């Protein structure tokens, strides 16, 4: 009795982590006629890999298939979204205490932008406290100079750097 190899199954997977490529080999009972069939037979995850090239060859035991795939590179916006989703920030709004400086007549919006404060560049163990102190100082200075009734916090620039390197 001759035992047949498994068909429509991956028999070899070689990944080059440095290059972001992989070679996938498998066997099929029928000749694949399209890239879609190759993807289906070799079970290529098209959310992670892009089919770059493929070939197939008929053998005595079926069709031998080989495919080269390239890792799909994520867009920076997708990477940022994943990082932000994974942060699990603990936001505790302070709605029970509101201070508005009524010395001034005109309502103002405070825009806090900490983009260039360079937190964490010195392997600072107390980064959270330093950051909190800086934001409190900015809010206090704004309170002393205007009737501040809304605050907008800008995320960007170096804050992205903090998020990426601390995650």
Image (cartoon, grey):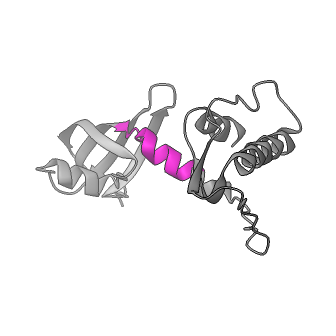
| Residues rendered magenta in the picture | 70-83
Q: Is residue 66 visible?
A: no
As for residue 137 lying within the magenta part, the answer is no
Q: Position of residue 7 (x, y in %)?
A: 31, 58
Q: To which quarter of the image does residue 148 belong?
A: bottom right
Q: To which quarter of the image does residue 115 belong?
A: top right
Residue extending furthest toward the left: 33
Q: Left of 65 or right of it: where is 161?
A: right
As for residue 74 lying within the magenta part, the answer is yes
Q: Is the residue 24 above or below the residue 110 in the image?
A: above
Q: To which quarter of the image does residue 118 belong?
A: top right
Q: Left of 144 or right of it: where is 64?
A: left
Q: Position of residue 9 (x, y in %)?
A: 36, 56
Q: Name the residue located 47 percent from the left edge and 35 percent from the top edge.
A: 15
Q: Where is residue 111 in the image (x, y as percent from the top left)?
A: 58, 47
Residue extending furthest toward the right: 125
Depth check: give the residue in front, 47 or 146.
146
Quarter of the image for the N terminus: give it. bottom left
């Amino acid at each position: 009795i001759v035992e047949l190899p498994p068909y429509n199954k991956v028999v070899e997977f070689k990944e080059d982590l440095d290059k972001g490529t992989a070679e996938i080999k498998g066997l099929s009972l029928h000749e694949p006629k399209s890239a879609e069939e190759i993807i289906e037979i070799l079970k290529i995850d098209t959310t992670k890999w892009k089919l770059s090239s493929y070939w197939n060859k008929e053998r005595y035991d079926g069709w031998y298939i080989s495919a080269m795939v390239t890792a799909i590179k994520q867009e920076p916006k997708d990477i940022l979204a994943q990082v932000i989703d994974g942060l699990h920030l603990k936001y505790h709004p302070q709605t029970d205490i509101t201070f508005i400086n009524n010395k001034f007549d005109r309502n103002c919006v405070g825009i806090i932008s900490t983009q260039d404060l360079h937190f964490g560049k010195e392997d600072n163990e107390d980064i959270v406290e330093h950051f909190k102190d800086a934001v409190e100082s900015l809010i206090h200075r704004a309170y002393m100079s205007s009737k501040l009734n809304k605050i907008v916090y800008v995320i960007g620039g170096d804050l992205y750097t903090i998020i990426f390197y601390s995650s």
